[in-house]
Amino acid sequence: MITKRFFLSALAFAASGLVCVHAQALPQGNAKNNDNGISGLIVNMTRTTDGLDFYRSFLEFWREKPDSERYSLEIGERSSKRLGNQVWVMYGQRRLFFSNLPFKLVKIRELSEQAADTAHEALIALALQMNGPGDPDIAGDEL
């Protein structure tokens, strides 16, 4: 989950003019909020128009996922002349998805759909791992 401290530091960083931050809260529905009251935020830390297209497409696909309003994520981007633009999806300190950003808009939409699927699967696996049966005979990779 994105903590209040992280959220405020991201806003302060954005206020410095170095990056544009856009946080969008998903509809809460029947989901329970976490203790600090922040859940369902998708923080946009992208820097380019292609990154923004990735963020918007990701948001569309993410909203279709069950229980997506329970998780707060960060969408980040790094520009590199040698490697091209790279995007990632973070949940807390865990990187759920990482890839190079394609040049075509159609491919960006496909990548964002793949990112939403991969992030959702990783969060389900993480939830199973954390709330698993606790059986010492079952290893983490056997879930």
Image: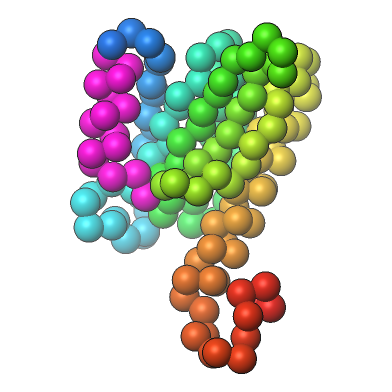
Q: Quick one: 103 or 70, which is closer to the camera?
A: 103
Residue 56 in the image: above or below residue 61 = above
Which SS does the magenta portion mostly show? helix
Q: How has the structure been colored for display?
A: rainbow
Q: Quadrant of the C terminus?
A: bottom right
x, y percent for residue 86: 64, 24
x, y percent for residue 128: 54, 71
What is the span of residues highlighted in magenta in the rendered image?
1-15
Q: For the point 38% across and 40% down, which residue is it?
A: 41
Q: Is residue 42 shown in magenta?
A: no
Q: Is residue 7 shown in magenta?
A: yes
Q: For the point 28% across and 11% down, which residue is it?
A: 16
In the rendered structure, the answer to whether residue 121 lies left or right of residue 95 reads right
Quarter location, residue 66: bottom right
* Whether residue 140 can be seen here: yes
In the rendered structure, the answer to whether residue 27 lies left or right of residue 75 reads left
In the rendered structure, the answer to whether residue 132 lies left or right of residue 10 reads right
